[in-house]
Image: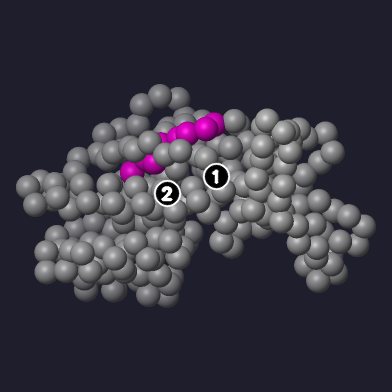
Amino acid sequence: MRIIIATIKSWNIAHAQAMQKRYEGEHEICIYTKKEEFTAENVRNFQPDYIFLPHWSYIMPREITDNWECVVFHMTDLPYGRGGSPLQNLIVRGHKETKISAIKMTEKLDGGPVYMKHALSLEGSAQEIFIRCADIIFEKMIPLFLENGNQKKQEPVPQEGEPVIFKRRKPEESQITPEMDLDKIYDYIRMLDAEDYPRAFIEFGKYCLEFEKADFSTEKKELSARVVFRCKDEL
């Protein structure tokens, strides 16, 4: 089988490279990590059976989605949670676990038919959750496509239920406010504590205080976190 993996996050890139080595001689795997590489011409030359998109943040050209089977991995139990910032929207709504939905990319945002789902814990920092998600996608979900592909391709089924739409969260929505309880402050800090994400913050005069590496003790009712002071003029 010939597959393309397109991703931009370090944890996914490491998994993709490991998968490429693991299946060498059995499946041909092409990895794209830059938008400029992922062109219709390159895809046409490779002729993949599947294109897998774990955490790809760019708009996909119609020429690619119309001609090749593209699989998106969305961090909600679809059709619940279509739309942007799924991890943050789940945590602010109080969810402790979710499902990774592998779906076929269509014109409808996160509305394509579902190949499979897998449970995912939402404990820990965003970085820890993303790494846990990558472990599942590359070690349990994509291998099913490859193994079943030797006999027949995976057939997705339509989503069932009423869609719930998530709006992409804006950086200003990550501000910690005085009325928040400690558990909510903890959630705000951890849900944004990941590579390339804007941190939860407090405005303090001419400074912006950004928080990361939070630890919360429910017994002591105590929250600790690393704080970085940044001058607003330099942001």
**Residue 60 to residue 214: above or below:** below
| Quadrant of the snapshot with the N terminus | bottom left
Is residue 64 in view? no
The mark nearer the N terminus, 1 or 2, is 1
Residue 89, horizontal then vertical, whole percent: 58, 39
Indicate the position of residue 107 as horizontal and vertical percent values.
39, 47
Q: Quadrant of residue 63?
A: bottom left
- The C terminus appears in which quarter of the rendering? bottom right
Q: Secondary structure at mark 1?
A: loop
Horizontally, residue 114 falls left or right of residue 98, namely: left
The outermost residue toward the left is 151
Q: Position of residue 146 (x, y in %)?
A: 17, 53
Number of marks present in the image shown: 2
Decide whether the magenta segment is chiefly helix, strand or loop.
strand
Q: Residue at x 52, y 40 (%)?
A: 123
Task: Determine if residue 115 is in view.
Answer: yes
| Residue 204 vertical placement versus 96 (above, below) | below
Left or right, 85 with reference to 158: right
- The answer to whether residue 54 is magenta is no
Write the residue at 52% across / 32% down: 96
Position of residue 17 measured from the top left corner of the image (x, y, whole percent): 31, 68
Choose top left, top right, bottom left or bottom right for residue 154: top left
Q: Residue furthest top?
A: 161
Residues drawn in magenta: 95-103
Q: Which residue is mark 2?
A: 132
Residue that mark 1 sits on: 124
| Nearer the observer, 186 or 115 | 186
**Amino acid at circle 2:** Arg
